[in-house]
Every structure is written in C-alpha cells, then in structure tokens.
Amino acid sequence: MPQNPVVRIIAFAALLLAVAVVVLAYTPWGQSLWQGKVAQEMGAAAIGGPFKLTDQNGKPRSDADFRGEYTLVFFGYTNCPDVCPTTLQTLTDAMTALGPKADKVTPVFITVDPERDTPARLADFVASFHPRLIGLTGSLAEIRKTAIAYRTFFAKNGATTPDNYSVDHTGFVYLLGRDGRYLGFLPPGLAPDAIAEAIRARLGAE
C-alpha cells in the first residue's frame, strides 16, 4: 500500500532535524558554529544567568559564589543509571588531568529531580567524584527556572509509583567564564583529555 505523501514529508523533515542536531553537537564545525556565531547572535546572556539554590551541605548558593573561577555546569540526577555518573566521572578525570590548574575550575551538578535529591542525598552522591564538585538542589520552581536559563530540558518519565521514575534531560556540560558568562558547551561523549585541553586553552588565553 503506497505511503501517504504527508507522512513521507514529515519523516524526511524529522530526519533532517536529527542530522542537524548531530552536526551541531558532535562535529568540530558544528561546535564552533554554536559556540561562536550562533551564541553571538543569540546574545551574551542567552544561556545562563542568576540562580539561587542549595548545595549538598544545606548552604544557600547563588551564581555569584562562583565568580573568579571557571565553572562546568551539568544537569542530571542521582538516580540516573548511566549518563550522569559517566559524565561526572569524565569531569573528574578532566579535573585530575588539569593538575594544579583545577583549582581555578569548579564543576557544578544541578539536579533535575529535586523531589528525591535532597542535600543529604546529593552529599552522598557527589562524594564519589572530584572533591571540588558542588551539588545543587532546590524547589521544583527554582530548578525549572535555572534549567530554562540554561536552555536545558527535563521531564519526568515512566512513573509507576511516586518514587519510581526516570528523568529525561539534556546531557550537555556548560562552560562558564570567571565572570559567569556562557563560553560554550561540551557535548556528551567528549574525552577527559579533550575537556582538560579546552579549559587549558581558556586559562592560557588570560
């Protein structure tokens, strides 16, 4: 039976969109375009901005606390089965590769599951990674506001009971400068050495 032409057009459009996403996220040209021309046209304040959350020790934290250092921001959750721990381990290895220069960089893990990720739970989780890693949580409204500022998507998925669900979320790591401004993103799957080199390049340009 012949396929509906409208269905073929929609399928082709979806394929083009998928290809565009791959090119932007995973190729050097795409990353350069996104981090340079596109980010410039969107405006310096298009990604990132002020936030007020709570760290793993129950201490209030804001974006201003990280001024004067580079910040690596990653959104995830402690129950994440693979992507989150893998990414945080990659950041840990990158920080180790930086050696003494790691003192100028702070990795920040912002939960997208504030219902379960209390400060105490975050404390146990981040303790498995680099000692400079900061875990942040807050109310759902505070987390959602922060995620929107960073153009990060998240949504609860597959809930069978109130405490049994996963959370779909964006997997980018955002690099912020000493002034808190967005510098670019690190796509999923980037090797620790590549992350360390990207940060060294920023430090060397100062």
Image (cartoon, rainbow, N blue to C red):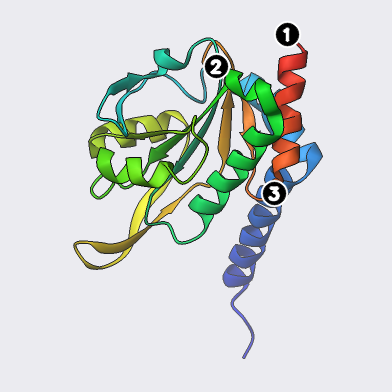
Q: Which quarter of the picture shows residue 138? A: top left
Q: Nearer the viewer, residue 206 or 22?
A: 206
Q: Nearer the viewer, mark 2 or mark 1?
A: 1
Relative vertical location of residue 27 with respect to residue 6 in this rendering, above or below: above
Alpha-carbon span between mark 1 and mark 3: 33 Å
Left or right: 201 as drawn, with respect to 101: right
Q: Which residue type carries mark 1? A: Glu
Around disc 3, counting alpha carbons within 10 Å, would you say few (fewer than 14), some (14 to 19), or many (20 or more)? few
Q: Nearer the viewer, residue 95 or 64?
A: 95
Q: In this view of the protein, can residue 82 be seen by the observer?
A: yes
Res 69 label: none
Q: Quadrant of the C terminus?
A: top right
Alpha-carbon span between mark 3 and mark 2: 26 Å
Precedes in sequence: disc 1 or disc 3: 3
Outermost residue on the left side: it is 162
- The spot of residue 29 in percent (x, y) is 80, 38
Left or right: 137 as drawn, with respect to 126: left
- The spot of residue 84 in percent (x, y) is 49, 51
Around disc 1, counting alpha carbons within 10 Å, would you say few (fewer than 14), some (14 to 19), or many (20 or more)? few
Alpha-carbon span between mark 2 and mark 1: 15 Å
Q: Nearer the viewer, mark 3 or mark 2?
A: 2
- Pointer 3: what residue? 20
Q: Which residue type carries mark 2? A: Arg
- The spot of residue 106 in percent (x, y) is 52, 25
- Pointer 2: what residue? 181
Precedes in sequence: disc 3 or disc 2: 3
- Pointer 1: what residue? 206
Outermost residue on the bottom side: it is 1
In percent of the image, x 30 and y 27: which residue is there? 53
In percent of the image, x 55 and y 16: which residue is there? 181
